[in-house]
Structure formats: structure tokens, C-alpha cells
Amino acid sequence: MKVWSLVNQKGGVGKTTSTISIAACLSALGKRVLLIDLDPQSSLSYYLGIDSDTLQHTLFDVFTSPQNTVKLKAIVNKVTVQTSIQNVTLLPSHMALSTIDNALSQQTGKGLIIKNALDCISSDYDYVLIDCPPVLGVLMINAITSSDKLILPTQTEYLAFQGLQRMMSTLEKLRTNLKQDARILIVPTLFDRRYNAAIRTYSLIRETFKESLWKGYIPIDTKFRDASAIGASIVEVAPESRGAFAYEKLTNDLLKHE
């Protein structure tokens, strides 16, 4: 089982869209995929038509359950729900996750809860995709410690580039402190080649982060809005679109470097 986390401290850069789209591409290849909505805003859960306020169990239960293998596996199985995408299931978020830093302030091993949970179900899935909150804290640390790859979506605009520099610095420090060697892959998103500003920023990202940059980009595509409006991925709704093609290429490139 491989774990890929989508991280960025800036919101609105395409983390959730990327999570859904990569999951759909993996599903089309026959892979068993688990999605983890680690953001208390629950964007991924809502995207998939799942209202966590109506659920008896959510990811919050995983963080607050006894940390022994038998009980942890049981609660993970209770929390997991099926999505509309074939072979793709979800651990839904809840707004209560926003209190986790305080709730677990005195608990040892709080940064390893997701890793421990995934270890319990490692034979059940081929890939796990974690949609992270745009905040550095216990939740993001749990994602990083669990991950084989850190996928960093970033808008091709100058302010997002400045945020990217800070995020890369933060991730490098965290990986060192956590003794974690997950590969970082920067994925340019919302790229509109009609505008010189976008082209200049893309070139700047390429020059600055050449070693960590995916050799491609996710374009602006109205089909993303059409897909999100019905809670589906662009790969399902518009498989011939530019956006679907870009995510298929990204997924294939991710798989090549396993």
C-alpha cells in the first residue's frame, strides 16, 4: 500500500480536486483506493456528497480511539464509507478535527495516529490519498509521517509562488525533524497559458524547484466546475477534456516513479 498526501498551507490551490481526480484515475486502472479527508472543513467529503454531520462515525473517532491494533482497525472499518467512484472509499472528516491540536496536546505519539491506523488495513488498499488542511499542526504532521509521496499543488500565480517557497522550507524542516524521506512533487495547477503572468510564474517555479517539479501542469478547464457540481471527477464526467488528460498524465507519472 502506497500513501500519497496532498499538502499546501495555501487554500484554493486544487488539493481536493487533485485528490478526487487522481483517485478516479487510479480506480480506472483497477486500483483499490482509500481517501482520507483530513481537513476539518470537509471539502473532500462534501464534494463526494457525504455530509459528515449526519454520520455516526467520522475520522475524529480514529484520533480519539484507543491506540491498540484491534480497536483501531475496528473503528477504521466503522468510519470508512463507500463513494460513488468504483473501488474508492473514504474516511470522512468532521469539524471536530479542528480541536485535535488541543485535545491531544498531552498525548504521546499523536503524530503517528494515521500511520498506525493505515498499518492496520495495509492489505485492504493499493493506494491511500490524504487531502490535508491548509494549516501546519497535528493533522498535517500525521499525513507527512504516513506518506511515501507528498504532492504539492500550487497555483501558477506570483503570490502562490511565494507561499510555495515557505511551504517547501517547512516541509524540508519537518521531514528532517520527523526523519521522513517522502518524495516531494510540486504540481502546477490552474494554469492559464493565455496570460503572461501565469507563464512567467510557471517559468519561475520551474527554475526555482526544477528537481521537485512535475514536468507538466493542470490547466484551467471549465469541466472541473461541471464535475464538482454533480460530485464526480472530471475523469468520469469529461474524459476527453484537457483537465482529465492532465490528471491521467500526472497519475501515470506518479506510478512510474514508485
Image (cartoon, grey):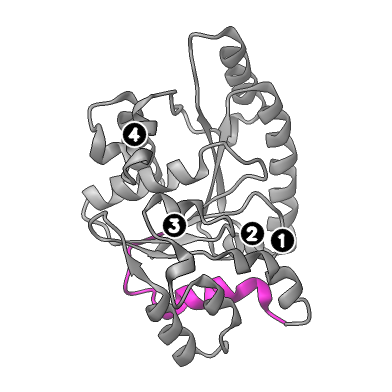
Nearer to us of marks 3 and 1 is 3
Q: Are marks 2 and 1 in contact (CB under 8 Å)?
A: yes
Earlier in the chain: of badge 4 and badge 2, it is 2
Question: Tag 4, which secondary structure?
Answer: helix
Q: Which residue is under mark 1?
A: 137
Looking at the image, the residue that sits furthest to the front is 54
Q: Which residue is under mark 4?
A: 249
Please name the amino acid that badge 2 sits on. Met
Q: CA distance from mark 4 to mark 3?
A: 25 Å
Residue at image coords 75%, 53%: 173
- How far across and how far down the image is residue 201, in percent? 63, 19
Q: CA distance from mark 3 to mark 2?
A: 17 Å
Residue at image coords 62%, 12%: 197
Earlier in the chain: of badge 3 and badge 2, it is 3
- Taking 132 as reference, is 53 left or right? left
Question: Tag 3, which secondary structure?
Answer: helix
Please name the amino acid that badge 3 sits on. Ser
Please state, as top left, top right, bottom left or bottom right, where the N terminus lies in the image. Answer: bottom left
What range is drawn magenta here? 108-128
Q: Is residue 211 above or below residue 55?
A: above
Residue at image coords 57%, 89%: 66
Within 10 Å of the Cα at label 3, are there few (<14), some (14-19), or many (20+) other Cα atoms?
A: many
- Taking 165 as reference, is 211 left or right? left
Q: Which residue is under mark 2?
A: 140
Q: Is residue 117 magenta?
A: yes
Nearer to us of marks 4 and 1 is 1
